Image: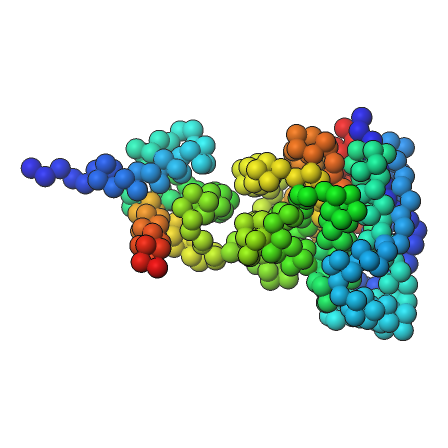
């Protein structure tokens, strides 16, 4: 058995988004209750999150933007930057705790306390741009973690795999000209947020280090596996990452109410197996996965179980 | 008598057929089974969008081409003939640049 860390905290449920918003506190509650019910919690190593230090958040976001998020949240505003990104008075602190949860997990993996980890955190992060909140995201947790791994832990090459059903535009943007972070996104296309076409492949020194796999609606487990095995695998191996980050949305699940993909829990299990085998070959098994989307409570909870079950196997 | 154009007369087309068979690890099809002008979607191969995604990524690397949108992928990957024409055009543009 591998030692898999779990980052979560009741405070993540205090980022309030309104009664009808799909990205709601109950998502985490459903995941935690399900993991406990199916007996997986006892096999996981609980890791305490911390608030991300601003110097790490500033590696990805501008200081004025960070200040604006703080001001808007504490000032009682209901939305920031786009109508879908709802906030509440605690959202700034909770966002720092989400990013900091990932940093704590990174420390635990790099320190050898666990082999891999999953962050059951919210708000999600992969749509957040340098100076713009969007798509339910305030701070880009996965991008901040990649920068942290490089600067705090001295790693040179990070692979980010984004299997959320929506393109990870914020993460792509953060590393578009950066050859030290390979960003792969597989997503429904055309779809929100409108980016993620094949032609978006990086620029300057980063040309060739962004790989988008746009998929038409209706694709399922076998299709995703084919893309991972035939398209991503050779690129991942030639990049030779020292750490793999996963933007783990579970909204490509067939039950998800916001998207039109057809994945099942078994699909997430197989994807996890594959990524785990690459990590074993390439980077000592180091995988840090963090929750992005996934809006059917039970499907998301079962998919997280499948994902963690395979990480722990 | 003049023989009909053979694959040997079109080395790029032959190369592309072999590239497709190798890249997609096709088991029951050889390069010789693929006609220059047959549809890659509806013909012998019956390729789907994931096959095209894989071919696009691989050909970008092999031939230095960049195919940017779905309509262009459909147009370029219509047949071996259209792929060869696209690559030849790309080479000609690169040579004259």
The residue positioned 39% from the left and 37% from the top of the image is B19
The residue positioned 49% from the left and 43% from the top of the image is B54
Q: Is residue A13 above or below residue A69?
A: above
Q: From where the camera sits, is residue A185 visible?
A: no
Looking at the picture, how far across and down is residue A32, in whole percent?
Answer: 87, 44
Q: From where the camera sits, is residue B31 visible?
A: yes
Quarter of image, res A107: top right
Quarter placement of the C terminus of chain A: top right
- What is the count of numbered marks? 0
Looking at the picture, how far across and down is residue B66, in whole percent?
Answer: 45, 53
Q: From the viewer's perspective, is A115 left or right of B75?
A: right
Quarter of image, res B28: top left
Looking at the picture, how far across and down is residue A309, in whole percent?
Answer: 78, 33
Nearer-the-camera pick, A254 or A172: A172
The residue positioned 75% from the left and 71% from the top of the image is A81
Q: Is residue A105 above or below residue A63?
A: above
Q: Residue furthest left?
A: B1
Figure coloring: rainbow
Q: From the viewer's perspective, is B59 left or right of A189?
A: left
Q: From the viewer's perspective, is A184 left or right of A293?
A: left
Quarter placement of the N terminus of chain A: top right
Nearer-the-camera pick, A217 or A291: A291
Looking at the picture, how far across and down is residue A60, in whole percent?
Answer: 74, 59
Q: From the viewer's perspective, is B30 left or right of A90?
A: left
Q: Is residue A80 above or below residue A36?
A: below
Quarter of image, res A133: bottom right
The residue positioned 90% from the left and 67% from the top of the image is A89
């Amino acid at each position: 058995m591998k030692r898999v860390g779990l980052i979560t905290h009741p405070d993540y449920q205090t980022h309030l988004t309104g009664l009808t918003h799909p990205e709601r506190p109950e998502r985490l509650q459903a995941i935690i209750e399900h993991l406990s019910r199916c007996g997986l919690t006892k096999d996981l190593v609980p890791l305490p999150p911390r608030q991300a230090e601003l110097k790490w958040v500033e590696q990805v976001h501008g200081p004025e933007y960070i200040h604006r998020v703080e001001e808007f949240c504490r000032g009682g505003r209901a939305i920031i930057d786009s109508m879908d990104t709802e906030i509440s008075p605690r959202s700034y602190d909770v966002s720092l705790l989400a990013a900091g949860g990932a940093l704590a997990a990174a420390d635990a993996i790099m320190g050898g306390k666990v082999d891999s980890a999953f962050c059951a955190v919210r708000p999600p992060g992969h749509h957040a741009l340098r100076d713009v909140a969007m798509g339910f995201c305030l701070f880009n947790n996965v991008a901040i973690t990649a920068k942290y791994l490089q600067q705090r832990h001295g790693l040179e090459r990070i692979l980010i795999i984004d299997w959320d059903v929506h393109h990870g535009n914020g993460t792509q943007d953060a590393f578009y000209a950066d050859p030290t972070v390979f960003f792969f996104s597989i997503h429904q296309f055309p779809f929100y947020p409108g980016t993620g076409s094949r032609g978006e492949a990086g620029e300057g020194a980063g040309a060739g280090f962004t790989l988008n796999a746009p998929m038409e609606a209706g694709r399922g487990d076998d299709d995703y596996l084919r893309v991972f095995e035939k398209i991503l695998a050779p690129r991942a191996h030639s990049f030779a990452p020292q750490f793999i980050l996963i933007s783990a949305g579970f909204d490509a699940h067939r039950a998800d109410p916001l998207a039109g993909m057809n994945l099942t829990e078994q699909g997430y299990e197989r994807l996890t197996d594959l990524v785990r085998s690459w990590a074993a070959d390439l980077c000592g098994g180091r995988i840090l996965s963090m929750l992005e989307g996934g809006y059917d409570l039970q499907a998301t909870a079962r998919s997280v179980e499948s994902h963690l079950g395979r990480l722990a196997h | 008598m003049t023989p009909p154009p053979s694959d040997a007369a079109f080395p790029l087309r032959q190369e592309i057929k072999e590239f497709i068979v190798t890249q997609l690890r096709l088991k029951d099809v050889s390069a010789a089974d693929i006609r220059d002008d047959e549809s890659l979607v509806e013909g012998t191969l019956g390729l789907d969008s994931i096959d095209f995604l894989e071919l696009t990524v691989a050909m970008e690397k092999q031939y230095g081409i960049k195919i940017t949108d779905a309509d262009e992928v459909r147009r370029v990957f219509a047949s071996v003939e259209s792929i060869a024409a696209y690559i030849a055009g790309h080479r000609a543009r690169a040579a004259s640049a």
